[in-house]
Every structure is written in structure tokens, then in C-alpha cells.
Image (spheres, helix red, strand yellow):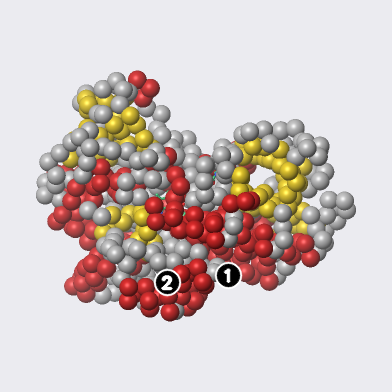
Amino acid sequence: MTIDHSKDRTELDVAIVGAGVSGLYALHRLRALGYRVRVYEQGGDAGGTWYWNRYPGCRCDVESLEYSYSFDETLEQEWHWPERYGTQPEILRYVNHVVDRYNLRKDIVFNCPITAATFDEETDQWQLSTGGGERIASRFCIMATGNLSTPRVPDYEGLDSFQGKWYHTGQWPHDGVDFTGLRVGVIGTGSSGVQSIPIIAGQASRLHVFQRTPQFSLPARNGPMDSDKETAHKAAYRSHREAALDTPFGMSGHPPPTQSALDISDEERQAAYEAKWAEGGSISFLYAYTDLLINKAANDTAADFVRDKIRQTVNDPKVAEKLIPHDHPIGTKRLILDSGYFETYNQDHVTLVDVREAPIERFTPEGLRTADGNEYELDAVVFATGFDAMTGALRNIALDNGAGLTIQDKWSNGPRCFMGLAMAGFPNLFMITGPQSPSVKAQMILGGEQHSDWIAEFLEYMRLNDVTRFEVEQKAEDDWVLHNNDIADSTLYPLANSWYVGANVPGKPRVFMPYVGGFNRYKKACDELAEKGYPGLRLSRYDEMSDVAD
Ligand SMILES: Cc1cc2nc3c(=O)[nH]c(=O)nc-3n(C[C@H](O)[C@H](O)[C@H](O)COP(=O)(O)OP(=O)(O)OC[C@H]3O[C@@H](n4cnc5c(N)ncnc54)[C@H](O)[C@@H]3O)c2cc1C
């Protein structure tokens, strides 16, 4: 991109890309500190994930009282969540309330994709370009572009010829879709598929579910908010938030396990799993014992319990066996919460098609054909095929450092970041919940707040020290990437072909992307970095280029 030194452009201190929950909080926080901040969002309104994913059944799988902002106690007290787990419309309503309450909209530009970003070495500024041709110069840039914001539609031959309608769960039409009386195909059985399938089955005249990978899923046990629970939680909200910061996954209410799954009798363990199953929720289940995610034998006890539950739920034993995962330890892919998913396969008009046995060969005008020669006639197809997770949004931007390094080159063998917050070679650029931070392995509103707060304090430190540039030292990044990988390798996570390692995107380098050392441990590392004066980050001023901090 050619650098624009004219004055015919917007000048900012901080440009934020993305108006999901993270970008919104970053705007609120930094504007209060007096920075000139603006958010650029490609969508038509705020909300990110909750703006785009409007498919039937879309719901958060963290309890509402936890999955919410913590920065304003009055907001916490005043907002009432009607259900245990927030639905997409309810979370979007909450986000819009936040946008209006803190008057954020005036500093957000909607329908405005950032298409290119180049660092200008001469002025220590990012030069951003929008899809509409606007130029923005900003000292700092924060990529709040999301981990799950780049929907992936597999490149099926013949899709253009298909005469029915197709949809991606991550780009759902705003006026909804009525499947009543239609022959529908759902492709994909990750979280979005599992959430939507029971509801689509309730409308469709015929439903085919095309499954490549069976998934572990637990009952959410959703229901109306228990008013006693809400009152008690709100009375102790501060201590809940404090407790959440001190857990591996950023949620309160789950006492740390003390025992190995292998140190107790089968009966005791079975009873504990039954209680967790009845309670609902994934953290409660995976946090039952100390070693479910680090010891395969321990993990097998939990996996076998869920396998048996699937067998007990699904009437046809052959269908049940196809639905049972055997290729990954439980919890090493995103552990799904469902409402009546496995029961759906007991309905006569619902058919499971195993596309690992016979892959989808091509779409036809009438539907699709699988490799065993079967033809499926369909009026509508739902791609529940997930996202180019964690790196897709950034790689879609023509992002370079002004000295010949592009993000595509930098990440050609998988993402490399310093604490998921910044990257060597890309001065003055931040990421919120970037790769190699806890990101998708912790409650993400909490993660977004923690990153934004850390960035705010760092910007204040730079302002105080009169510097205009920070750069990540290569060694600091290398050490962090190594640490991230060592931790991942000490767990069972890398055993799964999950989107955590990019396995759902053909050709994507296989690198374990989230930090799984625990949110609490990660936050401590961030806090220590600040306390020690940001070692590993080189600070300078553009007119002097002399280091002011070691
Ligand atoms: C179906 C679903 C269920 C989920 N459930 C949970 C859950 O239960 N618990 C949990 O903690 N997390 C959950 N998540 C993760 C969820 O993404 C986060 O909780 C949170 O919403 C992330 O907020 P964000 O602002 O970081 O990113 P996002 O919400 O993804 O927002 C990023 C925004 O950036 C915009 N953007 C991207 N690139 C550009 C560009 N070049 N120019 C302009 N704008 C751009 C996007 O349009 C998007 O609006 C879920 C995600 C999905 C998809």
C-alpha cells in the first residue's frame, strides 16, 4: 500500500478494527482516557459474533451471569438475563444496550471493512484503508477482529448450480429463515450444527444431517433464570468476578478439583459424572477431576460415560454408534452444550449421513451427491461448517509492516505472537484475544476486558514516557511461542484434529493456537510484564529512535 502523507485523512491515536464485545469495551476504556479513538466495523451494526450468528438455537454456553461485562457494577446489577444461558437475540439486545448506554455509536463507523494496513516507519503511524477508500492514520491499531468471525464454506463442486437456497450459520439472514415443509440438509455437526439441528428438525419435512466428525456434547439444562440464584449472584458480583479471574477458564462457581479421576472407585466416579450431567454445563464436567485433560486414561472415564449416554438416548443402535466420537479425547475439541440434540435422531424424518464413509462428491441442481452414489434432494442447505478460526480475520487484511513483512509471510507456518497481544515485526499493533492468548479457552468477554485494560495501561505508560513506538523483541516472542507449545504438548489437546489446530481448513499449518495454561496464569504473566516495566517490548520515539526503556 502506498503511504499517504497528505492531511486529507482521519488522524487518530487509536484505530480499533471490529465492533464485537472486545472492540466496544476497548473504545469505552480508551476514550475515557482521552485518546482519539474510532472503531471500524465491516458489519451493519455492533455485536460481532452475536450480530452475525443468528441461526436458530444460537446460544452462549457460558451462563449469562458470567458472560457479561464486569466493568460497571451498576450495569451488572440492572441488567436482567431471562435465561440461564443467553440466546443470541438476548445477547445482541444487551450489546446494543451497552452501545447506547455509553454512547459508543458516535465513534463507530459501520459497513466499513478495513482492507489494508501498513505501518509508516517515518511517523510511527498505521495507515489504514477502508473498503470505501477512506484513509486513516493512527498511532496505534487494535485488531479486535474476533477469533470466530471468518465463516468458512467448503469449496464444493457444483454449489453454483444448486437450485435451492443455502446459508452459513455465521452469516445468517437478519429476517430469519423458515424451513417449514422443506427438505433440508445440515452440513457440519460442530457447536452451531448441534444447536440448530433440533430446531430445524422441528420445521423441516425431511432433515439430512451430513456428519464428518461425531462430537461429544453435554446437556445445557437451559431454563428460565432462577431468581434466587440471580439475587445471590448479584449480591456477591464482585467476588464472583474476582474468583473468575483466578480460574483457568475465567468463570466463577466451579471449585477446583482435588482428585485424579483414577484415584477413586468406579461407583464414586460414575455418581460424580451423573451429578455433573444432571447439572449441565461443560466446565463443571471437565473440571470434575484434576487430570481429565492431561491423562488419557482419566479422560477415557469421562468419554466413556458420555458415549454410554449417547447409546441410551438414541434408539437406533447403528445411528448411536455413528454419533459416538472415538477419534479424540473428550474436551480436546470445543465441548458442545446442546438442548435435545441426540434425541433429534429418534425422529423418523431425520437421517444421519456419515460423510466420512462416503464424502460429499458434489452439489447438483436438486441437492447433493455422495461418493457412494447416493443422491439427496434438498430445498435448502445449512452450512454449519465453522470458521477460519483465530487467524482468518487478520489474514484477510492486506497487513504489512512497511518494511516488506506481510502478515501472510509472518504466519506462513502458523501464527506467532507475543502473549496473543502483539507481534515482533509489527510495531504499535495490538490484537485482542489473539493466538497464543487464552482466547477461546476462557470466557471471552472477560478476556476482551483484560486485554483492553492491559493495552490501556501500556498506552498510558508510553504516554508518560513520551514514546511513540513499541516493538516486540524477537526473542520475547519466540520464548512465548515455545512456552505456549510446551503447555499445549503437556495436555491432550493436540491429539484432536480440531479448529484449535486449524484442522478444519485445508492447507492451514497445524499449530495449536490458544494458550491452555489457564487464564489465571496468563493474567499473572501480563500483570508481571507491566510491573517490571514491559521487558521484551522495545520503546522508542520516532524523531530520536533511542530506547527509553530496556
Ligand atoms: C456461535 C458462537 C457461540 C459462541 N459462544 C461462546 C460462549 O459460549 N462463550 C464464550 O466465551 N465465547 C463464545 N463464542 C466466542 C465469541 O466469539 C466471543 O465470546 C466474543 O463474542 C468475541 O468478541 P470479539 O469482539 O472479540 O470478536 P467478534 O465478536 O468476532 O467481533 C469481531 C468483529 O470484527 C469485525 N471485523 C473482522 N475483520 C474486520 C475488518 N477487516 N474490518 C472491519 N471489521 C472487521 C467482524 O465483522 C466482527 O463484527 C462464541 C462464538 C460463536 C461464533
Residue name at image x 38 percent, y 22 percent: 160
Quick one: 8 or 327, which is closer to the camera?
8
Q: Residue 281 occupies which quadrant of the picture?
A: bottom left
Q: Return the residue at label 2.
A: 252
Amino acid type, residue under disc 2 in the picture = Ser
Number of marks present in the image shown? 2
Mark 1 closeness class: few <14, some 14–19, many ≥20 residues within 10 Å: few
Quick one: 497 or 420, which is closer to the camera?
420
Residue name at image x 37 percent, y 27 percent: 156
Amino acid type, residue under disc 1 in the picture = Lys
Q: In the image as oriented, which residue stretches furthest toward the right?
A: 544
Apparent side of residue 189 relative to residue 348 in the rendered image (left or right) = right
The mark found on residue 524 in the picture is: 1
Relative to 396, residue 423 above or below = below
Apparent side of residue 452 relative to residue 6 in the rendered image (left or right) = left
Q: List x then y, in percent, for residue 364.
A: 29, 21
Question: Which quarter of the figure is the N terminus placed in?
Answer: top right
Asked if one can make out residue 351 in the rendered structure from this viewpoint, the answer is: no
Residue name at image x 42 percent, y 75 percent: 234
Q: Nearer the viewer, mark 2 or mark 1?
A: 2
Apparent side of residue 337 relative to residue 392 in the rendered image (left or right) = left
Residue name at image x 35 percent, y 50 percent: 58
Asked if one can make out residue 534 in the rendered structure from this viewpoint, the answer is: yes
Question: Which quarter of the figure is the C terminus placed in?
Answer: bottom right
Quick one: 160 or 285, which is closer to the camera?
160
Q: Earlier in the sequence, mark 2 or mark 1?
A: 2
